[in-house]
Amino acid sequence: MTISVYIPCDSTALALGADQVAATIAAEAIKHHLDIKIIRNGSRGMFWLEPLVEVATPDGRVAYGPVKPADVASLFDADFLAGKSHKLAQGLTENIPFLKNQERLTFARVGITDPLSLDDYIAHDGFKGLQRAITLTAPDIVKEVLDSGLRGRGGAAFPTGIKWKTVLDAQADQKYIVCNADEGDSGTFSDRMIMEDDPLTLIEGMTIAGIAVGADQGYVYIRSEYPHAIATMRKAVDIAEAAGYLGDDILKSGKRFKLHIREGAGAYVCGEETALLESLEGKRGVVRAKPPLPAIHGLFGKPTVINNVISLATVPIILAKGAAYYQNYGVGRSRGTLPFQLAGNIRHGGLVEKAFGLTLRTLVEDFGGGTENGRPMRAIQVGGPLGAWVSQSQFDTELDYEAFAAMGAVLGHGGVVVCDDTINMASMARYAMAFCALESCGKCTPCRIGSTRGVEVIDRLVNGENKLEQQALLTDLCDTMVAGSLCAMGGMTPYPVMSALKQFPEDFGL
Amino acid sequence: MNKPNELTAEATIQALIHAHQDEPGALLPLLHAIQDALGYIPETSLAVIGKALNLSRAEVYGVVSYYHHFRQAPPAKHTLQVCCAEACQARGANQLIDQIERKLGCKMHGQTTNGNIALEPIYCLGQCAVGPNILVDETILHARLDESVIDQVVDALGGAK
């Protein structure tokens, strides 16, 4: 009997040697005359266990990790193909608490299936959302998304259904769906995982969006720092098109949707939606003034839905199971789930999809297990380079858009970067300003000039030159950037700076 | 240095222009294709690209110089891009960068004296739970870097000396 062995092809697993592990297991199986089938699945998102090797047994998949090529011979000796015990054995994958305690909706298939297997995708509820969508009218699809309470998962949290309705109601000869896959925030990788580990769900979501608003062209703008995601998405588009899930006659419904994969070029600010549209048009990625909104005047001047990867990848399950199913998760105005990403100095780093409403402490302590090196946690940056630093006294805040906004912080795209007590917060504040100076598109003065002045003021403050004056100057500069910048780049760089200054003044010599 | 023969480069650029010029918003895909083929965007190509896409040379140059990804000079034989972003900093990237600079004998944005390896910063490779991370030759990722992994990687690329 052929035994199925799962070894991830996700780029984190690859970065930790998954290809070498797969080759060693294949060679060892031949040596032992054992009949195995190696399946390159996505990652379960338990990165401290990668490469995570799973074996299919009658009881379910049994996990072993982190596996190095040197461990393979001993795994065969221990009869891991029968799920037997070994020092790397983790038991049944589904029962690992980190995974078991999650609520995986958007990530339901991630780590379970072969990302490029259409059969696997369909066997795990794939295309059910699209099949339902082609039976609905366009306004009914939009209503379903609106009723689900889904808000933009890129970070701005604008209701996705309202964006869609604006584009649906706009009159034009051409409309577009654009997927913002320029996931540049440090500490985030959920978009990357969807694209590498379950790309067909993003394709399905974009196709539903196209049918809903009357757009027959779509673009996925993926950052150049993600070569594996780009390669997987290109293959997935070809597979979907060949099978009639994309193209001129989707599922013989007469509806048309073409999808194009475009590669970014290393500009962080292109994650801002209007800069991204400029870049797609072949220009410098400079931010546009709003209004007009992209929903009215977007790509090539046409009405455009521009959504983050996670927003679009969540649409299939909303359509498949109904708005109420999704809306039942979450708290307050934060409905559904958010795929949080545990990163930085954390023992159990990886992807945690949970309904909104758990506390940050639950996330980093119960799921994350504290710091990797065992030192106390001092500060956590939530929401990427433009997110505030959160200190111990705030760890019990519930993860929900409004609760974080109330304390001057953001959830953003769900990235959580944990730092231990050796972190110097003045140097992190300086880094935030320096990063803004490096990545500013240059269109507005508060961001372009303010960021450089910000680095200088922080340097003078740390050097102890007229400290109180510098502190006042930095606060004033940050006010100007928040109030006067055209987009979040300059408008939110003050979040990490001011949160560091307020909560860790001692690091600035104050 | 693998600076291509000028004639071949010119023919390559023409072929790529032909392949991409009818795409909507063709400039970025075209520049990617040229850099993938030649390793950089030759200065002599700017006017040619502009003419094909109905842009001025200045507009093309503006785009090439705006994006960190596009190179305006031939690259070193190998590129080592080290993640400098927050999550990797939280896992000791700054100390590691000092070690890499010593090992290569060059600073960030520089290259080894033998022209074999260029060292560049990159801001997030999406491997934030297992940093510090590097990307080698824009394709191969290495995570959980320490000095021994760096030694192996640099030696496998043919060394710094």
Image: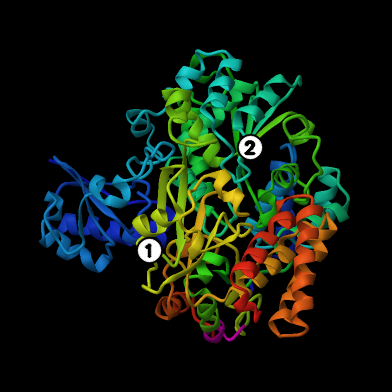
The answer to whether A495 appears left or right of A248 in the picture is right
The answer to whether A426 appears left or right of B18 in the picture is left
> Is residue A494 placed above or below A277 in the rendered structure?
below
Q: CB of mark 2 within 8 Å of CB of mark 1?
A: no
Point out the stretch of residues depicted in magenta: B101-106
The answer to whether A419 appears left or right of B40 in the picture is left
Q: CA distance from mark 2 to mark 1?
A: 36 Å
Residue assigned mark 1? A16
Where is residue A35? Give x, y as percent.
16, 47
Q: Quadrant of the C terminus of chain A?
A: bottom right
- Residue type, numbered disc 2: Phe
Where is residue A94? Give x, y as percent.
25, 45
Give the chain of mark 2. A
Q: Quadrant of the N terminus of chain A?
A: top left
Front-lying residue, A191 or A370:
A370
SS majority, magenta: helix
User: Which tag is nearer the camera, tag 2 or tag 1?
Assistant: 2
Q: Which mark is residue A158?
A: 2
Q: Is residue B99 visible?
A: yes
**Earlier along the polypeptide chain: callout 2 or callout 1?**
1
- Residue type, numbered disc 1: Leu
Where is residue A228? Give x, y as percent.
49, 52
Q: Secondary structure at mark 2?
A: loop
